[in-house]
Structure formats: C-alpha cells, structure tokens
Image: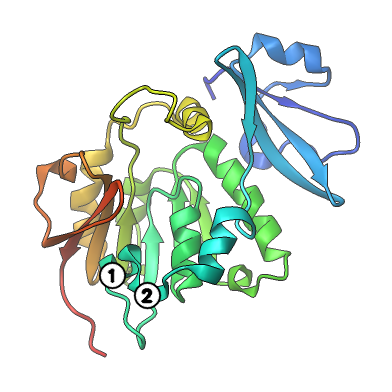
Amino acid sequence: MSANFAFLAKPNTPHAPSLLRDLPTVTDQSEVSQYHGYFYYNIENTVPFLSFAAPLDNKEANFSLDLTAGTIAYRRQHGGGRKQHIAKACGLKHNWNPNILDATAGLGRDAAELRSLGCSLRMIERSPFVASLLADAIQRAQQSSVELFHSDFSLHQGQSIQLIEHLSQQQQPDIIYLDPMFPPKSKSAAVKKEMRLVKLLVGADPDADELLPVALNHAKYRVVVKRPSYAPYLNEQKPSMSIESKGNRFDVYVLSSPSL
C-alpha cells in the first residue's frame, strides 16, 4: 500500500484487520502526526469499532461506519419503502426481491437501504481502506439484533471490472448498481468532512466510465447508476430513463424484464 497511513494500536483493542496488515503499526498517539491519517479501534459498550482519523482544516476529524444506527436505522424504520427513488430505479415490486451487485460499495449505505427493502446484496469495494471500515461495520451488524444483515449481505475487496468479468452464469446478478465517486460541484464547507476523509482514502477514480459497459454485459435485468444531478451520464451513455432525487439522479439502463 503506497498511501501514507498507519494503524494506531491502542491497549486492549484488536490487532489491525487483515486489509490493513501492510500499514505500519504505531503504539504512541504522538507518532501518528507523521502520517496523512491513521486507523484505530475504539470501544463502545464493550464492542470495538474501527475508525479513521486525519487532519482537516487544522483539526483532527474522524469517522467510522455503523449500519444499524443513525440515518440508516431511521430510513429503515421511517423511510418510504418501495416508493423511494432508489427502489423505483431498481424496479422493485412487491413480489420481486432481486439479487443486486453493488460494484462501488463505498460506505455501504445504499446497499444497506436496498437490503432493508428485501434485496440480496453483494458488494465490491476497490479501496482496501474503505473496505476495512465497511467490513468492520458489516461484522458488527451481523452480530447485532438486526436480522436483516445476518444473511444475503456480503463484501468483496478488489477491482470491480475484474471481479464482474469472472462471474459465472450462476453468479450473474439481477441488477448491478454503480455509484462511482464524482468531484463535488464546489469545495465549499458544505462538503461533509466524512466525504473529504473518504476522498483521502480512495484517491482518484479514473476508470469509472469503464465500469458501465462491463456492468451492461453482465447484469441480467438492469444497471442502475447513481449520479449527482449536475454530473454527465456515465461513459456518456444515455440511459433508458432517469429518476431525479434531491441532489442526485438515478440513471437506469433496462436490459430486460423479469418474469413475475
């Protein structure tokens, strides 16, 4: 790993997860200042959770992921169900629960929302740094009382194009979901600190356009691409239809319809 990150080993916390095993390990908080950012475990209610911290605007900012609390839990309990834009984009109907491959998993929030709507989810995340945070959140979710995440919710770390091209016919997903990173419209303070930290972890995303033709060749029924409202079509390819949401747009490429 070429990124200048470290793992801070705190007393009585787990060792670095496997995806971070190549990072240098430090044991003193003062040592992290020589790195662009660092990972560490905190303990909350006796449960360790992986976090990432880095300096932003001359202050340290940090974040971790939780699929069972916060905004995700609120939307699961009070969201619009299958009337939501993401559900419409995926063509969800009352008697159809597709298996979806989220090829740009990121923080896992869209995948968690689709799981709460009854879909089976496989996720791919190319960044080992982001994948380590998401894997930690998935592990805690699978050990929680939220049964949704106990099955049909898995993560693979690697390059989506390569992994998708090696899927067998039996592994072919009904839907491939894409949400590649796109530069924010401005660099204002409105851009959340969390997303700035994610950008630091992920870096550039130069091959996003190449994902679309691969997805179109391997999805069974449709490909759904989430984009900022102001962003161009992925790979400059016009979709079958678009569904506008607040600040975002779901571009839908319909390949065929399931027999229900």
In this figure, what is the number of numbered marks?
Answer: 2
Under tag 2, what secondary structure? helix
Q: Residues within 10 Å of mark 1 (few under 14, many from 20)?
A: some
- Circles 1 and 2: CB atoms closer than 8 Å: yes
State the image quarter where residue 101 is shown. Answer: bottom left
State the image quarter where residue 29 is shown. Answer: top right
**Coloring basis for residues:** rainbow
Rendered residue at 66%/49% (across/down): 136
Relative placement, left or right, of 72 versus 103 is right
Question: Which residue lies under the disc numbered 1?
Answer: 88
Relative placement, left or right, of 224 versus 10 is left
Relative placement, left or right, of 255 versus 2 is left
| Residue 128 drawn above or below residue 46 | above
Instruction: Check disc 2 and give the amino acid type.
Output: Arg
| Residue 149 drawn above or below residue 51 | below
| Nearer-the-camera pick, 218 or 246 | 246
Under tag 1, what secondary structure? helix
Q: Position of residue 169 (x, y in %)?
A: 31, 71
Label 1 – label 2 distance at C-alpha: 7 Å
Outermost residue toward the right in this view = 12
Instruction: Check disc 1 and give the amino acid type.
Output: Lys
Rendered residue at 52%/69% (across/down): 78
Q: Position of residue 218 (x, y in %)?
A: 25, 62
| Residue 32 drawn above or below residue 74 | above
Does residue 51 appear in this view? yes
Badge 1 or badge 2: first in the primary sequence: 2
Question: Which residue lies under the disc numbered 2?
Answer: 82
| Residue 147 drawn above or below residue 238 | below
Quarter occupied by the C terminus: bottom left
